[in-house]
Image: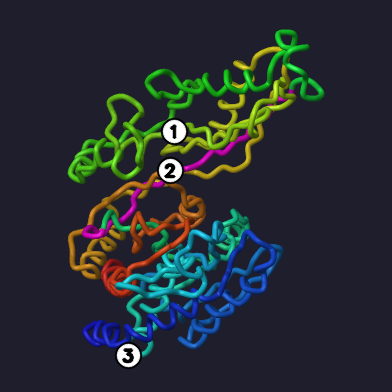
Amino acid sequence: MKNVFEFLHLSRPRHLEDLLAFLRIPSISAQAAYRPDIERAADFLCDELKDLGLTVEKITGEGNPLVYAQTEIDPSRPTILIYGHYDVQPVDPEELWNSPPFEPLVKDGIIYARGASDDKGQLYAHVKAVEAFVRTGTPLPVNVKFLIEGEEEKGGDSVYEYTEKNPAKLACDAVLVSDTSLYNEDTPAITFSLRGMCYTEILVDGPGQDLHSGSFGGTVRNPGNAIAAIVASLHDGNGRVTVPGFYDDVVELDAEGRAEFDRLGYGEAELVRDTGSPASFGEANYSTLERMWVRPTCDVNGLWSGYIGEGGKTIIPSKAGAKVSMRLVPNQDPDKIARAFTDHVNAVAPSGVKVEVKVLHNAKPVLVPRDSAMMQAGLRALETGFGKKALFVGEGGSIPITGTFQACLKVPVIMLGYGLPNDNIHSPNEKFHLDNYYNGIRTSVAFFDEASRLTRK
């Protein structure tokens, strides 16, 4: 291992240049005009993994290509499946970028570029970890498989369908995912829980067209008023969701997990500082981090009706709507929650309007036992890679494929985050600290070594 770590240190300038080349490819999956660049990004990875001696497949179909690669499989060694995505978010609003989003800028030890943290930089750390073994002639202590997709940022189905159809091909002892973050600049972390998702749209139809509010006000139900009443019914005054059965299957955080959260020292003052909100708000008797990471939520993401332009326009709008997302926790089932939500909306819907609920997207929550051998191996690897004590943390967001991996492959998903919470992912001026990139490569190398000690025959 000494030779491998020395190689990593000496290779930093080239590892940076290689990452910059990857970042220059504008692989935006949500916009059709960038499809050629999606192909370029997939080919970039295929070429590099082939050059490292892996068997590589570029899997094409209706969606963007999947990249699958594997080392020669030695049955006596554990197998690690590495997941990541090469596609990136759109750059809008581009005028808010301080430098061109696909012309990476390195300044004060930070890379600024779209995809730098989400997820090219984090994914590429694993590629460079494999390279370190190959270039130094050091046998990889584990078998490695890669499954890299190009649709994560637009919610494509290709990787889910492939995983469900190929569990034997993807068989492994653990899945390694780096698409999360450190807790802060001084504290590396493994994410052990992710919230799931139930994303819905409520549509309210009233009169056949907008009506003059003077002539018809008080004679028909106003869809704007109706959607307001429906939305108001989703919570009580203490922030608790009022959908019947919403909390029935919720797994409460255990005392050990609660104590770990408390030790992080993140409370209302820190939340107000980070969000600019006047005050915190949420379920009573739960801490800020519990509300953020391990409690379910129900939030309006968009609300519309009537005239919102300059000046006045006295109408009764003909339509109204709201987009409502629910973040779910173990053991909530998205399909069950969707049915309960739909039943609730229909039950509270005022008369005189037509109400429809559409379920747009579901994802299952994820909980990985903190005491599993692979999770503990990940914790030790982070401490080796970053030279600091690592923690377990929750994550309020979702990485839907992790639930599919758990269900289909029946192995732990180890989420080693190398970014930072303030890396501006999905926003202008996305960034990635060089130290986190280099330490991430070290962590991946250390994880291969730690994992090999668990089941080597």
Q: At 40% across and 32% down in the image, what residue appears?
A: 250
- Look at label 2 and name its amino acid: Arg
- Per the image, label 2 sits on a secondary structure element best described as loop
* Viewer-nearest of discs 2 and 3: 2
Q: Residues within 10 Å of mark 3 (few under 14, many from 20)?
A: some
Q: At 29% across and 49% down in the image, what residue appears?
A: 393
* Viewer-nearest of discs 2 and 1: 1
- Per the image, label 3 sits on a secondary structure element best described as helix
Q: Nearer the viewer, residue 118 or 222?
A: 222
Residue hosting label 2: 195
Helix, strand or loop for the magenta stretch, by majority: strand
Q: Is residue 237 left or right of residue 32?
A: left
- Residue 379 picture location, percent across and down: 25, 60
Disc nearer the start of the sequence (1/3): 3
Residue hosting label 3: 136
Residue hosting label 1: 297
Identify the image quadrant of residue 381: bottom left
Whether residue 433 is situated above or below residue 310 in the rendered picture = below
Q: At 46% across and 37% down in the image, what residue appears?
A: 328
Q: CA distance from mark 2 to mark 1?
A: 10 Å
Q: Residues within 10 Å of mark 2 (few under 14, many from 20)?
A: many
Whether residue 293 is visible to the viewer of this picture, yes or no, is no
Whether residue 275 is situated above or below residue 313 in the rendered picture = below
Identify the image quadrant of residue 345: top right
Whether residue 311 is visible to the viewer of this picture, yes or no, is yes
- Residue 400 picture location, percent across and down: 50, 51
- 4 falls in the magenta region: no
Are the residues at dot 2 and dot 1 in contact (C-beta closer than 8 Å)?
A: yes
Disc nearer the start of the sequence (2/3): 3
Q: Magenta part of the protein: which range?
A: 185-205
